[in-house]
Amino acid sequence: MVDKARFPILRSQRLVLRRIHENDANSIFKLRTDAVVNTFIQRPQGRADNNGLEFVNRIHYDLSKNKIYHWVIVSSESSELLGSICLWNFNVEKTIAEVGYELFPKYYGQGIMSEALTEVIDFGFRQLQLTSIEAFTHRDNERSTKLLIKNGFELSPNRSDVDNLNNIIFIKQKAC
């Protein structure tokens, strides 16, 4: 079980990746319901009455069951929430996980997600001893595709996402 007090805080030059808190609910709600963010994501839109709290509670539950590592990405200078990133959808052996991420559009093109992804990949391979990390992204999401390739992911052309045929799958293997 992931202990709240020991949840891994990841740091980079400009960012802090930390556990999601209830006071993040409004920002998370805005992020998860942003029209630009959701351009290439297939998910039901959030209800206006939950303000993200339902999502935060679900993440806390999944954390307690070791189903996910979910970080909010905040600026190390201002503590402003910029986005989120997670490792989830682990295989039974806990050697493969999927990475997911989203960022407020006003921060696109600043290298923020690349910086966060670098830290999460390092955590996954070093601390969790993953052998590979997968990413599912919409075939038309050029930003996401470029991000993944820049960070050493390779397209897996013979695989398909049965839940969303518009997705393509990238894989990054742990270096030997």
Image: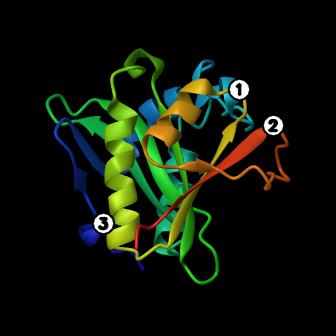
Q: Are marks 2 and 1 in contact (CB under 8 Å)?
A: yes
Q: CA distance from mark 2 to mark 3?
A: 34 Å
Q: Secondary structure at mark 3?
A: loop
Taking the image as shown, residue 77 lies to the left or right of residue 145, namely left
Whether 54 is drawn above or below 82: the answer is below
Q: Nearer the viewer, residue 90 or 63?
A: 90
- Crowding around mark 1 (Cα neighbors within 10 Å: few <14, some 14 to 19, many 20+) is few
Residue name at image x 60 percent, y 18 percent: 36
Q: Say which mark, if any, is on residue 166.
A: 2
Q: Return the residue at label 1.
A: 140
Q: Residue furthest front?
A: 176
Whether 51 is drawn above or below 105: the answer is below
Q: How many marks?
A: 3
Q: CA distance from mark 2 to mark 1?
A: 8 Å
Q: Residue furthest top?
A: 106
Residue 92, horizontal then vertical, whole percent:
64, 81
- Crowding around mark 3 (Cα neighbors within 10 Å: few <14, some 14 to 19, many 20+) is some
Q: Amino acid at mark 2?
A: Asn
Q: Are marks 2 and 3 in contact (CB under 8 Å)?
A: no
Q: Quadrant of residue 168?
A: top right
Q: CA distance from mark 3 to mark 1?
A: 34 Å
Taking the image as shown, residue 170 lies to the left or right of residue 63, namely right
Q: Return the residue at label 3.
A: 7
Q: Quadrant of residue 14?
A: top left
Whether 71 is drawn above or below 91: the answer is above
Whether 90 is drawn above or below 88: the answer is below
Q: Amino acid at mark 3?
A: Phe
Q: Nearer the viewer, residue 103 or 32?
A: 103
Residue 83, horizontal then vertical, whole percent:
41, 35
Q: Specify which label sits upstream in the sequence, 2 or 3.
A: 3
Q: Secondary structure at mark 1?
A: loop
Residue name at image x 28 percent, y 64 percent: 8
